């Protein structure tokens, strides 16, 4: 970790609830990394009778911090955006402590040998109810509505807080970096369609699982779409010079990026290639190479 990142981690508000709006508090898990930034943000929505969004890793100190932050209140529901190990495993110990039902995304288990933003999928995730796109959960003064946003994972949901015009974006939109889209479950075409879906909404603020709140959501989504289109153009430019492997393209395209992220970058490049292949623009060449279609 570089000095600037170490400073951010040292100053991060672990172990306590940060008030972010009249209805929203955040408790930050102490799981910083080049992929999770300063850690996974667990959100507490409401007052008195609350919902917890993304209980995070099954870390005893983090679960204790959530319980301390909601002391004297009732956790009425836990909502999960997706089942990567930095988001959902905390649901098991938190449910044991408070009895709240687990709602949200569908279970997902997948064999995946590629590098990713965490250790993989949560095999212990067992929701009491899977929420469909548009389905709502409510409590005193708050309503959270599921917004299906596949792409980062096929089961990814965002949650709209209707009373404040806010959207909890999980890993679909992050506040500090672009999202890893890692095949075989991550799908670039679905991810781009989900970004376009958010552009049609009028949310005033995003609460990502990693990074600070996003205060100009539509502008940020347009930036993310443009960034992906730029990466796509870079891939096509690489292949215009001849057959290339994914590692060769990553070395050329991500030269200024921390090498620890190159494995995950390669997965996103692969996701772009699979999308381009489905659109008839590229195809697999000899060995591990990819080529432009004539």
Image: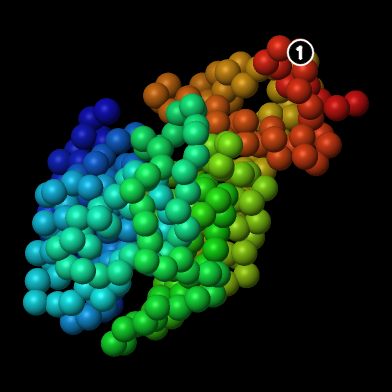
Residue visible at 33% across and 48% down in the picture: 124
Residue visible at 50% across and 39% down in the picture: 110
Left of 8 or right of it: where is 145? right
Left of 51 or right of it: where is 151? right
Report which quarter residue 284 is drawn in: top right
- Which residue has dot 1 on it? 286
- Placement of 53 over or under 201, stated as above or below: above
Viewer-closest of 286 and 204 = 286
Residue 109, image x, y percentages: 47, 43
Q: Is residue 82 visible?
A: yes
SS under mark 1: loop
Which image quarter holds the N terminus? top left
Viewer-closest of 216 and 238 = 238
Residue visible at 58% across and 37% down in the picture: 184
Residue 238, image x, y percentages: 71, 23
Q: Is residue 211 visible?
A: no
Report which quarter residue 248 is drawn in: top right
Residue visible at 55% across and 27% down in the picture: 266
């Amino acid at each position: 970790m570089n000095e600037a990142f170490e400073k951010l981690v040292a100053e991060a508000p672990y172990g306590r609830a940060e008030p972010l709006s009249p209805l929203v508090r955040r408790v930050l898990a102490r799981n910083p990394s080049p992929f999770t930034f300063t850690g996974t943000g667990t959100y507490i929505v409401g007052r008195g009778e609350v919902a917890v969004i993304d209980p995070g890793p099954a870390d005893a100190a983090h679960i204790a911090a959530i319980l301390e932050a909601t002391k004297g209140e009732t956790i009425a529901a836990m909502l999960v955006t997706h089942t990567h190990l930095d988001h959902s495993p905390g649901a098991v110990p938190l449910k044991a402590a408070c009895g709240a039902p687990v709602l949200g995304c569908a279970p997902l288990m997948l064999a995946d040998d590629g590098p990713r933003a965490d250790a993989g999928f949560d095999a212990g995730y067992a929701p009491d109810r899977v929420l469909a796109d548009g389905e709502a959960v409510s409590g005193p003064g708050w309503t959270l509505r599921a917004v299906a946003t596949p792409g980062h994972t096929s089961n990814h949901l965002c949650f709209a807080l209707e009373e404040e015009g806010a959207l909890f974006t999980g890993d679909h939109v992050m506040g500090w970096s672009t999202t890893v889209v890692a095949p075989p479950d991550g799908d670039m075409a679905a991810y781009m369609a989900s970004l376009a879906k958010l552009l049609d909404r009028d949310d005033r603020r995003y609460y990502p699982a990693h990074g600070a709140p996003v205060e100009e959501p539509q502008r940020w989504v347009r930036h993310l779409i443009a960034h992906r289109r730029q990466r796509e153009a870079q891939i096509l430019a690489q292949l215009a010079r001849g057959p290339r492997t994914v590692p060769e393209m990553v070395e050329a395209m991500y030269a200024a990026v921390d090498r620890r992220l190159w494995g995950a970058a390669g997965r996103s490049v692969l996701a772009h290639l699979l999308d381009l292949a489905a659109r008839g623009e590229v195809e697999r060449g000899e060995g591990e190479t990819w080529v432009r279609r004539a």
